[in-house]
Image (cartoon, rainbow, N blue to C red):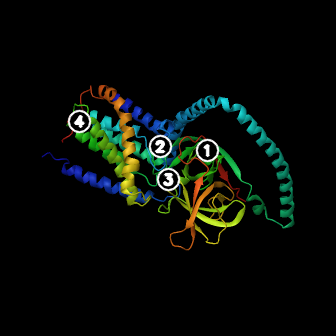
Amino acid sequence: MKNRWLVTLLLLFFLLEGGLFPWLLPAPVPEGFAVSPRLALVGILYASMLRNRNLGVATGLILGFMQDIVHDGPMLGVHAVGMAVAAYAAGTAGMRVKSGFVLPFFLLAIGLALNDLAVFSLYRLFQVMDLSLSDFFARQLAPTLLFNLLLAVPLYVPARKWLSNVPDKRDEEPA
Amino acid sequence: MFRLLGNKKLILLLACLILFIALMGLTLNDDGRMSWPEKFVKDTVSYGQSLIYIPIAKMSEFVSNLASLHLLYEENAALKSKLMDYARDTARLNQLEEQVARLEEALAFTERQKKQNRYIWHYADVVSASPDPNVPTININKGELDGIRVNMAVATTDGLIGRVASVAPFYSTVQLISAIDYHDDASKAIAATVKGKPDSFGMIERMTKDGYLEMNKIPATDLLEVGDVVITSGYGGVYPHGIEIGRVVSRRVGDFGITHTALIEPFANLNGEQLRQVFVIEVPEP
């Protein structure tokens, strides 16, 4: 039941990404720099870290495909791969990190960076853009990470409370 | 050392990877055609996004209106003088239209030739903007059933902002001109000319990092100057003639020394953010 609510919430997050954030983003982002809101991915990473890795990977795939379809990416599956990889990595590492306050954010940052890197490298591989790696790091990844971590901090405590008080299903999988 | 992946998982992972790469390769350059599951997902999600975006856009406009309340008097005066201009222009337009119709008659224009400059402007609300900066698109609430087709030009009251990239029954996606890139086959260069200098020619092929449009292939003898207003020329068939794009800010000799390159500051807001209404421009088919 809680999983169902979680997926609904993540869908809502996804709608907010395209619908609300264009109005919320700090207006003076300098020309050439880009901040992309990844609220849904933050939610997915929390779900994957604190609750169930498989759930995270599955919702990552679904929302990633939704992103590619709804916002008309150059090809299907790019964000799906990025989000699934990020969720898998965060979930795998999160299994070993149950407490602490700094480490989860470190994992979160890694997950967000993994997604963006995967998307960037796939776009480069298929030659749909010519952004250089250094420009990508300085102009996209850094501001995006900063913005999303700021977004993620207030969500952490409610997420941990809500997500991790049920018996953990991760232990079923052979590690 | 713990094992990150079991053998079975590794094979599964590799299979997934191959599957995804194949999927990406197959869906690359699909000319905006969508399969029915894609259409379904797009319409459903866009509807959800519109429930958020449109009220917030209204609210934001209301707030900014309140903030600019003290400018109301000046704005009113400016609008009144615009209205006078408009009345004068309308009289002149009627006259010119009559004249054009007479001349077209005299030159035995076909129906198709007569119609080709009478664009239909479809008004549409924006329902969401892409969060991915590498894919600058917006979704609008008009689709196939409203007569929107792939590759129609899209503009705001300021100027050209892009073209329709894909169409679902009720919603469609607009690729903004900030996505223009000669590395990307999915974006289309804009054939452009200068307002008042119909012999000028250039191709807008790229957006620079600092937000200017790069217009290439301008003949060295071209009359284009800094400060000129650049409009679409209608050559190339994607963008119809006469939509304003921006103002020339600089001109220099191009990379190969044969043609010139100009930088153009676009009139419209191309951030894809905080756009409310756009117009889709339909060129009537015979």
Determine which residue is flagged by label 4.
Answer: A170
Instruction: Give neighbour class at mark 3: few <14, some 14-19, many 20+ (Cα, 10 Å).
Output: few
Where B235 falls versus A62 (above or below)? below
Instruction: Give neighbour class at mark 2: few <14, some 14-19, many 20+ (Cα, 10 Å).
Output: few
Q: Report x, y in % for residue A141.
A: 37, 47
Could you tell whether B32 is left or right of B123 in the image? left
**Visible residue check, residue A36:** yes
Where A151 falls versus A62 (above or below)? above
Q: Amino acid at mark 4?
A: Arg
| Disc 2 to disc 4, C-alpha distance | 40 Å
Along the polypeptide, which appears first: circle 2 or circle 4?
2
| Disc 2 to disc 1, C-alpha distance | 30 Å
Q: Amino acid at mark 3?
A: Asp
Q: Chain of mark 3?
A: B
Numbered circle sitting on residue B210: 3
Q: Are marks 2 and 4 in contact (CB under 8 Å)?
A: no
Q: Are marks 2 and 1 in contact (CB under 8 Å)?
A: no
Residue at image location 61% in from the left, 53% down from the top: B149
Residue B278, picture quadrant? top right
Residue at image location 80% in from the left, 45% down from the top: B85
| Disc 3 to disc 4, C-alpha distance | 47 Å
